[in-house]
Image: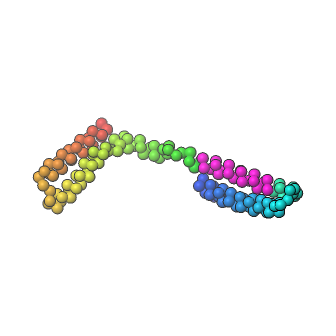
Amino acid sequence: MAIMETVKQQIDRHIDELKIDNESLKADLEYFYNISRGKSKIYIDSEKLEKLFFKADEICRTVERLDRANKILYQNRGKSSFKKSAASKINGAKGGRPPKEISAARKRINELDDKWVRGLITDEEKKEQEQLYQLVRDWENKRKPK
């Protein structure tokens, strides 16, 4: 049974292949450079030259595979997935995300509730609390589907 690679695993594998192929090609070229230093003409074994050509060609193919894998990995960037689209649709049917004003009101209600529980709430804060509760209730009633 073959195990399928993720796109990220493919990219990592291709990068490792590139490193190995590049180091090998670099070593071979360095060898030929060193034996050719100070000479005006050099003769090279056609078999060795062909080997170098195929190594360079393999590096190019690996770069192309890496580019394709990278495009696949990032093709959906900025686009929503099916799951996100479905969740967004459901949340939208419920009225969506509350406005900042409602979120701030809920936060302040929690603070005032804590004060009320401890018996530290003032008459002014009780009025504020009632107004905030009313604001949140009105918003919730407005967003409920009829």
Which quadrant would the N terminus be assigned to in this image? bottom right
Relative to 90, 68 lies left or right: right
Which of the 4 quarters of the picture holds residue 17? bottom right
Say left or right for 73 vs 50.
left
Q: Nearer the viewer, residue 131 or 32?
A: 32
As drawn, 93 above or below 2: above
Residue 47 can be seen, yes or no: no
Res. 102 in view: yes
Q: Is residue 43 left or right of residue 3?
A: right
How far across and down, in percent of the image, does residue 122 sit? 12, 55
Quadrant where the C terminus sits is top left
Number of marks present in the image shown: 0
Percent across and percent down for residue 139 are 26, 41
Residue 114 screen position, x and y as percent: 21, 58
- State the residue at coordinates (22%, 43%): 135
Q: Which residues are magenta?
A: 52-71
- Residue under the point 57% across and 49% down: 73
Q: Nearer the viewer, residue 94 or 81?
A: 81
State the residue lying farthest toward the top. Answer: 146
Residue 84 in the image: x percent, y percent?
45, 46
Q: Nearer the viewer, residue 59 or 33?
A: 33
The stretch drawn in magenta includes residue 64: yes
Q: Horizontal placement of 21 versus 131: left or right?
A: right
Is 38 situated above or below 133?
below
